[in-house]
């Protein structure tokens, strides 16, 4: 891990790389592996192991008393990103 990257950031980057790696073709997997080596500062073999590790099933705390599974949290993030893109497109069309 690079010294300027927090553990939380590293975990988030690794989670996204794992998801993309799991759904990618062979050529794209090589590119994702190179990204993991560069971004996380891992040796190549350590990056391969990290990308093949299963996703953790931890719960994410949204606020005191409210926790959701990681999958639900990831889905909500994707949904919010899509909603933001949609609203941005509408706003730029109105301008």
Image: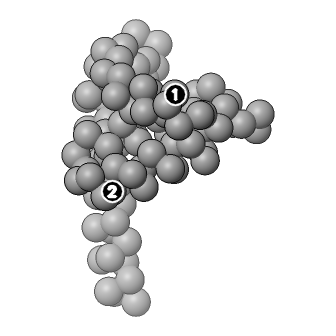
Say which residue appears at 32% left-offset and 86% top-offset: 93
Residue 28: mark in rendering:
2
Q: Badge 1 is on which residue?
A: 46
Say which residue appears at 22% left-offset and 46% top-offset: 23
- Outermost right residue: 3
Tell me the quarter of the picture where residue 39 sits. Answer: top right
**Residue 33 locus on image (x, y percent):** 45, 45
Say which residue appears at 40% left-offset and 41% top-offset: 16
- Outermost bottom residue: 95
**Residue 87 locus on image (x, y percent):** 32, 68
**Residue 55 locus on image (x, y percent):** 32, 23
In screen coordinates, is 45 left or right of 65? Answer: right
In screen coordinates, is 17 left or right of 21? Answer: right
Dot 1 and dot 2 residues touching (CB under 8 Å): no
Who comes first in sequence, dot 1 or dot 2?
2
Say which residue appears at 76% left-offset and 38% top-offset: 4
Residue 6 in sight from this viewpoint: yes
Residue 2: mark in rendering:
none
Residue 70 in sight from this viewpoint: no
Q: How many marks?
A: 2
Question: Callout 1 environment at 10 Å: few (<14), some (14 to 19), or many (20+)?
Answer: few
Tell me the quarter of the picture where residue 6 sits. Answer: top right
- Outermost front residue: 45
């Amino acid at each position: 891990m690079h010294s300027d990257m927090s553990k939380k950031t590293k975990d988030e980057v690794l989670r996204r790389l794992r998801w993309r790696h799991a759904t990618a073709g062979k050529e794209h997997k090589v590119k994702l592996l190179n990204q993991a080596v560069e971004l996380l500062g891992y040796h190549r073999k350590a990056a391969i192991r990290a990308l093949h590790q299963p996703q953790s099933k931890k719960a994410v705390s949204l606020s005191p008393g409210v926790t959701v599974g990681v999958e639900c949290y990831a889905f909500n993030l994707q949904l919010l990103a899509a909603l933001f893109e949609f609203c941005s497109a509408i706003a730029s069309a109105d301008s």
